[in-house]
Every structure is written in structure tokens, then in C-alpha cells.
Image (spheres, helix red, strand yellow):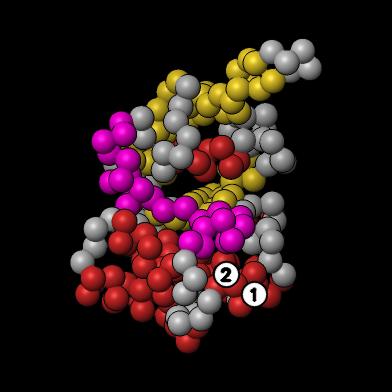
Amino acid sequence: MAFIEIKNLTVEYNVTDEKGEIHAEEALSDVNLVIEKGDFISVVGRNGSGKSTLAKTINGILTPASGEVLVEGMSTKDFSKIYEIRSKVAMVFQNPDNQIVSTIVEDDVAFGPENLGVPSKEIRKRVDDALKSVDMYEFRTNGPHHLSGGQKQRIAIAGAIAMMPECIVFDEPTAMLDPKGRAKVMDIIKTLNAKGMTIILISHFMEEAAEADKILVMEKGKL
């Protein structure tokens, strides 16, 4: 069984036209894809091609209009499985400010494991290990608002790592960073993959996409 299997996936958005009438518009159209454990896949394409929509279907943020997304055989349309799916597939978004929920770095990294019901002693270990893995342990008692954009993104990645997923989907994680911050984030991503984590990287930067084992191109909602 494939780790992630996408079958005939179509996703629609409601769009209001010039007359004020609402109609459905396809963001993804009949997408098929198989991702195995340990893969490092990058997804590229122009704005509006469907990259981020594809990313958000993999852990159930968006649900299919038709077709399905399976994570270890579990359908993202089955809401009883959504916590289990999200414990296996975490996401890191473009803007870390949209993911940071606490006023102390270590509390923010603990947020995901707490929601999964992880015991307190285990959370402490996960938080420390995750912060060390992104070279942010010394900032654990700081306020995130005092950090740079690159440091905030590393905290967001630590939060995903602390959930101990099998896969992380990175949706343009370096888009708001300077070259030094981008390089640090890419180093972390490559290290995670080298340790066996499945990586799906949505990126505008071809030099980043080229680090992956396979590059997928989206165009007008199709793969």
C-alpha cells in the first residue's frame, strides 16, 4: 500500500462572477499521484496553478469535490480519521506568523503534541528535541515576536517536528525569507528527509525544487 495515494482528485472553489452569481470553479482537475514513504517531492507551477490547493488536500484542510486522497489507506473525507491523518502528515505554511499561537517559543512548539494528547513528560522531550533539530533551543523561553522571519519559520518547523509525523508538507516555506533564512530552512528539510521523513515541498524557487528526488509541475489545476 502506498503511503499517500491521490486518485482522480478534483477540488472546487465557489467563485462570484461579475454578475454576482456564484458558480463552482475547479482548482484541481483529475489529479493522480502516488507518494511513497521517504520520498522528497517538490511541486512547482505559476500562481493559481493549484500547488497550494494540492498541499492542503493531503492532510485534509481541503476535501475533494470528487476523487479521494488516502494516507495509509485512510480517506481525508472520513472526518473520524482526520486527527490520525494529521498526526502522520503535518504542514508548514508560507507565513510563520499564521502558525504561531503562543507568546513563548517552547509553548508554541508544544501546542501540536498537546492537541494530540501526548503525555506531559513526552511533550517536554519532543519540544527540546525539535528545537535542537532546527538550532533554536537557546530561544526556547523567548517571545516569537522578537525573532526574525527565518527564526519564526524554524519555530513553525519545530512545531511540526514535535508532532512526530511521517511526512511534512511545506507550502512555500521560504517565500518570505532572505537568502540566509532560505538556506537554513532548506538544510533542515534535507536533513529531515535524510533521516527518513517524507517531504513534499511547494516552491517558487527552482534551485530549491531541484534538491528533491522528483519534481512535479502543476498547470491550470492539472499535474
136 versus 72 height, above or below: below
- Please tell me whether residue 196 belongs to the stretch shown in magenta: no
Q: Position of residue 139 (x, y in %)?
A: 50, 83
Q: Is residue 157 visible?
A: no
The residue at which mark 1 appears reads as: 148
Report the amino acid beneath label 1: Ser
Few, some or many residues within 10 Å of mark 1 (<14, 14–19, 20+) = few
Q: Position of residue 114 (x, y in %)?
A: 30, 61
Q: Secondary structure at mark 2?
A: helix
Q: Report the magenta residues as a range.
A: 78-101
Real-space Cα separation, disc 1 to disc 2, in angstroms: 6 Å
In this view, which residue lies farthest toward the bottom?
A: 138
Nearest the eye: 208 or 141: 141
Nearest the eye: 38 or 101: 101
Q: Quadrant of the N terminus?
A: top left
5 versus 155 height, above or below: above
70 versus 199 height, above or below: above
Q: Secondary structure at mark 1?
A: loop
The residue at which mark 2 appears reads as: 152
Asked if residue 144 lies left or right of residue 58, the reply is right
Asked if residue 103 lies left or right of residue 77, the reply is right
* Residue at point 56%, 37% (across, down): 53
Task: Name the image quarter holding residue 115.
Answer: bottom left
Report the amino acid beneath label 2: Lys
**Pointers 1 and 2 in contact (C-beta within 8 Å):** yes
Q: Position of residue 175 (x, y in %)?
A: 68, 58
- Please tell me whether residue 89 belongs to the stretch shown in magenta: yes
* Residue at point 44%, 31% (across, down): 63
Few, some or many residues within 10 Å of mark 2 (<14, 14–19, 20+) = many
Q: Which mark is residue 118?
A: none
